[in-house]
Amino acid sequence: MPEQVNDTIATRRLLTLPLLRRESIGESYHVLTFDSKEAILAEPGQFVMVRGAEWGDAPLLPRPMSYLTAGTTPSILIKLLGEGTVRMARAEPGEPFSLLGPLGRPWRAPNAARRPILVAGGVGVAPLIFLARALAARGLSPLSLYGGRSARDLPLDDVLSDLGELQVATEDGSRGHKGRVTELLPELLGSGVEVYTCGPDRMMARVAELCAARDVPCEASLETPMACGYGVCLGCPVPTSDGQYLYACVHGPCIDSRRIDWTRSDHAPHRLPTLARSES
Amino acid sequence: MPEQVNDTIATRRLLTLPLLRRESIGESYHVLTFDSKEAILAEPGQFVMVRGAEWGDAPLLPRPMSYLTAGTTPSILIKLLGEGTVRMARAEPGEPFSLLGPLGRPWRAPNAARRPILVAGGVGVAPLIFLARALAARGLSPLSLYGGRSARDLPLDDVLSDLGELQVATEDGSRGHKGRVTELLPELLGSGVEVYTCGPDRMMARVAELCAARDVPCEASLETPMACGYGVCLGCPVPTSDGQYLYACVHGPCIDSRRIDWTRSDHAPHRLPTLARSES
Amino acid sequence: MRAQTVRIGELMLKNPVLTASGCFGYGLEYDDFFDVSELGGICTKGLSLHPRLGNPPERICETPAGMLNAIGLANVGVEAFCREKLPMLRERGVTVVANIFASSVEDFVTIAERLEKEQGVAAIELNVSCPNVTHGGIEFGRDPRMAAQVTRAVRAATHLPVWVKMSPEAGDIVAVAKACEEAGAHALTAINTIRGMALDIETRKLRLANRTGGFSGPALRPVALRIVWDVAHAVAIPVIGIGGIGSARDAIEFMLAGASAVQVGTANFADPCAAQKVALGIAAYCERHGLNASDLIGAAR
Amino acid sequence: MRAQTVRIGELMLKNPVLTASGCFGYGLEYDDFFDVSELGGICTKGLSLHPRLGNPPERICETPAGMLNAIGLANVGVEAFCREKLPMLRERGVTVVANIFASSVEDFVTIAERLEKEQGVAAIELNVSCPNVTHGGIEFGRDPRMAAQVTRAVRAATHLPVWVKMSPEAGDIVAVAKACEEAGAHALTAINTIRGMALDIETRKLRLANRTGGFSGPALRPVALRIVWDVAHAVAIPVIGIGGIGSARDAIEFMLAGASAVQVGTANFADPCAAQKVALGIAAYCERHGLNASDLIGAAR
Ligand SMILES: Cc1cc2nc3c(=O)[nH]c(=O)nc-3n(C[C@H](O)[C@H](O)[C@H](O)COP(=O)(O)OP(=O)(O)OC[C@H]3O[C@@H](n4cnc5c(N)ncnc54)[C@H](O)[C@@H]3O)c2cc1C
Ligand SMILES: Cc1cc2nc3c(=O)[nH]c(=O)nc-3n(C[C@H](O)[C@H](O)[C@H](O)COP(=O)(O)OP(=O)(O)OC[C@H]3O[C@@H](n4cnc5c(N)ncnc54)[C@H](O)[C@@H]3O)c2cc1C
Ligand SMILES: Cc1cc2nc3c(=O)[nH]c(=O)nc-3n(C[C@H](O)[C@H](O)[C@H](O)COP(=O)(O)O)c2cc1C
Ligand SMILES: Cc1cc2nc3c(=O)[nH]c(=O)nc-3n(C[C@H](O)[C@H](O)[C@H](O)COP(=O)(O)O)c2cc1C
Ligand code: FES
Ligand code: FES
């Protein structure tokens, strides 16, 4: 564990904030915006541990969520999965939430000499939208590739297209390219670009593979189960190519994709929607 | 356990009903009214096991609550105590609740030859209001004695006074007689009356004692912790004067006060408000 | 519909869902709710040789996602059960597992012999793991030799299938399980409650008159599941899983871990139809996956 | 303010609240949150002789009101701890309890000897009860003789106070506790986690790569409280209570049951300031009741 931890750490706080508003996007996605007196100085790629202040003893653990926006109205984009996200999706304005953040290592600063390509899968779009906004603020315009199962699984695609060029792919062909979003990538890779990706492990593994083959810098934002989110439980190991572990909450979630052993990072049954599971 | 179980039992059902409205009465009391397509045929003195359908795994057990009214808009009067009642008091219209009822033995039918005296302590007023309404529907007008710590602890006193004569007592003297409500009782007892009581154990024990001394029939509605409410867990024993146990959920909650061993029924630390406890 | 029957030794159950002892009365309290004969079976409240009053109040208290109980095995006694309860259960066609409890091997045998005389008892479940009584109970279930001794004695006294209910408090549960298997148990049921305690900090009193109580409910599930896995991987006889099961998902977890059937306990309190819903949910899962219920047993990968 | 100090043998703690091993890192991750030296103390992540990578993912999973962990004692090793972590803790004035783990008595001794050389270690806590490693761990903690052997050997090797952390999976925990007392332990800490398991019914896979994980959190509290009561009523040395403590109310329950101090574990995850809040809450309770913290110990009626 010789890894250095990011330095925005000095601003980590546990705040209890009321929900300001909740907007649903289709059936499975919601944007939750909170009301904070002090501005949250989160950077794109960082995350926050979120828990309803009134949840009692169960669900017990806070849920890691990427910041969609920061400042005095920090927001997150959630996908309904299990009990935690279902409760979040039921919350009404005014309901208090505990937010611990900003946490983790943000996206590495873009290299001005390269055009950023953002590769998003489903809800993984959240930290990439935050990044695209930051790039736009600097006058940079990213190229975004955005994939999902169907047109319904591309929440906030309009935001991305407002911020730069957007290409979409859906597995059922209901929008854009029919197939995987990674199929759009090869022809775009070259010495003038760099890649940022967040989405399902399998998608990110493929992005990493393509980038490695063409020597394109690629940063991936990892999802692992987390108990604490701030480096004390050691519950969030990410196997690295040199046989060690990085800890996603402090060494990530944004990590240089070449450091990760992608063959060992898809164990997680967690990654299946629990809602489907609980139907039975 | 040779005790016979009441016969309205044939209508027990577990229903999931939306909250229709919630009215607060001061800081500590709320009336919750539910919306039922079918009329709930509860009788005065019966109770219902109430649990938020969205509570998840905790709090685990449903909470026993006396019916305040029955029919298609069944309602309960709750006093804030611990996690269960606090959650109920936060519920918004539309929130689904599981209601198992009607349960238990209702108040014994009034004897037309006697004037009913209702002795209520705090939230114990709920099943007595229901009784007073039923009496009023038959053209009978009960005399109600209603006590609490202060004027704030006499929720729905106006309902009682609309239904008959009402005398109140508060320990701090902020309304009516200064002192215990049981102090109002002795001069009212005689051969022409019968008593129904619900409130703190100590109050009911005193009512029972006074009635026994004057040979006045007295029925008490007991509060014990309950897990099931329908006779299977055996968690709700009430010590009887012959050294046996009755089970409050099926043999009660309304029981002839002479059958109860009041000296053995005040063990419960449960009876203290948990809210106060959790301050620390 | 996919076949839902499961075998527990010689006994064929309609489906893998029973109700747990002490959490379903005598199975006669459910006429308003559902037809109990639809279940795989019910386990009766623990029956002793003589009627028992049980412990003084308070007997129960809630804990995070669980509860404590110290009922103290209040029951009508085996005689009254045979005369007053069993005929009604028989009439309703309910598969009845008689859960029995005693503080000596002799009494276990006497109870079993009494049940042996009746029609309509599908199996006997030996409660050698009750944490809420002073004598007998948990001591038998903690020690492999004592557990085996009770099992062997009851086996010799009855033709009925004998199930032994495991205590999670045994230091070496697998050793107890193996000893019971060797002693002739037809099945093992796991788990009974673990002893817990709760205190009120304002009165500074213990919440239960019995001081400790058995801990049950969803909170207990991960521990129960681990024990069922361990036991099922160590013995050849069927194992029946218990502990915090409230949904089909929970029940399927136990079956995948090696349970041939499951029992629903605490979940009946909040929902009298819980066991029925679990059974229906397992059937739906089987349908969806093209499996029979018996295919689930030990199918974890 | 009422006195909040409590004595654990020779060691005087500022207040009765420590943080539990494995749930507070090395105590250096809290600068943003609060001044860790305000606590009664911290227990470090379990230290082994050599650094350990820990188990592969998944290492954690949530359960009703609790969680399972199978970290596998990932840690920097005692040497790196002494060189890189301890000086910073010393500088901050933190009361440090070094939680140590080994798979042989010799290694336990070697680690203790290494710590003995340092300033700033207030006590050593022997983890003879880790459920997540193949060797050592829980075997030591289940058997009174083995637990005593480790205790005696470490006592002989160091002048530091020695605390022994009890496993709830011992068949006879009181026997283990007494054996450790006799072997010279200065205090007992109870409890470590109980092994649990979870399965995903769609993939049919176990949720944890290690198969089982240690069960912790509020769900565990009633079981932990009962064990603390039993142990505290059986030994004369101080007992430190652990298990699902997240509020002052929980902590006071343990103290009333006989604990001289408490440790806050899983609760730190949702709230990094949990232990600080527990300590403040106990002080407020003491104020309200006109008691010193030490008056609470074993004061249940
Ligand atoms: C750094 C990071 C950023 C994330 N950002 C987002 C985001 O912006 N929007 C979003 O919808 N989701 C995001 N996730 C995933 C999100 O944390 C899970 O979807 C969520 O925890 C599921 O909780 P649940 O109660 O609904 O599901 P359950 O399956 O009921 O959760 C059970 C347990 O597993 C954990 N868990 C389940 N799935 C995941 C997962 N995919 N990743 C991590 N833990 C999981 C939960 O936290 C909980 O502890 C992020 C995860 C990480 C690690
Ligand atoms: C037949 C009957 C009728 C009742 N009618 C009413 C009513 O009309 N209005 C009302 O406000 N209250 C009524 N009560 C009491 C009510 O059940 C408790 O106040 C409530 O359960 C407290 O829950 P909690 O989660 O807020 O408190 P907590 O203290 O957090 O509850 C913890 C556990 O203890 C049990 N418990 C705590 N206090 C009591 C108590 N006094 N009686 C029974 N169980 C308790 C809870 O049900 C729960 O299982 C009645 C109780 C019974 C038995
Ligand atoms: C109120 C109550 C009473 C119980 N009585 C008995 C009993 O008489 N005999 C027995 O073997 N188990 C008894 N148990 C244990 C249950 O059968 C079951 O093993 C345990 O509760 C765990 O399952 P659960 O979490 O589904 O409740 C009782 C449990 C509860 C909650
Ligand atoms: C993630 C995690 C890691 C743990 N690591 C250790 C450890 O290294 N050494 C140890 O003795 N106990 C360890 N424990 C056990 C805790 O110290 C504590 O005994 C247990 O979690 C019960 O307390 P709690 O419910 O407050 O968490 C760990 C617990 C958790 C949750
Ligand atoms: S989530 Fe706890 S260390 Fe990463
Ligand atoms: S509450 Fe279960 S028997 Fe009365």
Image (cartoon, coloured by chain):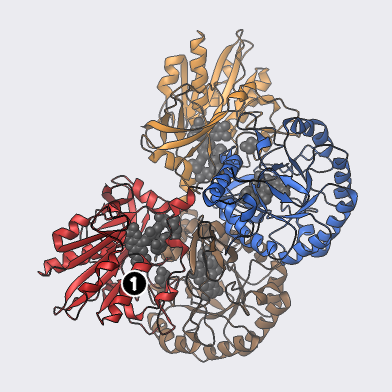
Chain colours: A red, B orange, C blue, D brown
Q: In front: A16, or B55?
A: B55
Place of residue B111 in the rendered image (x, y in percent of width and height, measured from the top left) = 62, 11
Asked if residue B199 shows in the view, the reply is no
Left-right relation of D102 to A194:
right
Q: Quadrant of residue A164?
A: bottom left
Q: In front: C15, or A133?
A: C15
Place of residue D107 in the rendered image (x, y in percent of width and height, measured from the top left) = 60, 88
- Quick check: B46 above or below B277? above
Quadrant assignment for the N terminus of chain A: bottom left
Query: In the structure shown, which secondary structural element does the residue marked by tag 1 occupy?
Result: helix
The residue beneath circle 1 is A206
Place of residue A227 in the rendered image (x, y in percent of width and height, measured from the top left) = 43, 65
Asked if residue A163 shows in the view, the reply is yes
- Quick check: C38 above or below A264? above
Left-right relation of D7 to B97:
right
Left-right relation of A112 to B185:
left
Judging from the image, mark 1 belongs to the subunit labelled A
Q: Residue, x 46% and y 84% (percent of image)?
A: D76
- Quick check: A220 above or below C130? below
Say few, some or many: other residues with alpha carbon within 10 Å of mark 1 (under 14 / 14 to 19 / 20 or more).
Answer: some
Q: In front: C58, or A56?
A: A56
Amino acid type assigned to the residue bearing label 1 in the image: Arg
Q: Residue, x 67% and y 51% (percent of image)?
A: C261
Q: In front: D33, or B179?
A: D33
Q: Residue, x 28% and y 45% (percent of image)?
A: A93
- Quick check: A254 above or below C117? below
Place of residue D174 in the rendered image (x, y in percent of width and height, measured from the top left) = 70, 67
Left-right relation of C110 to A49:
right
Q: Quadrant of residue A274?
A: bottom left
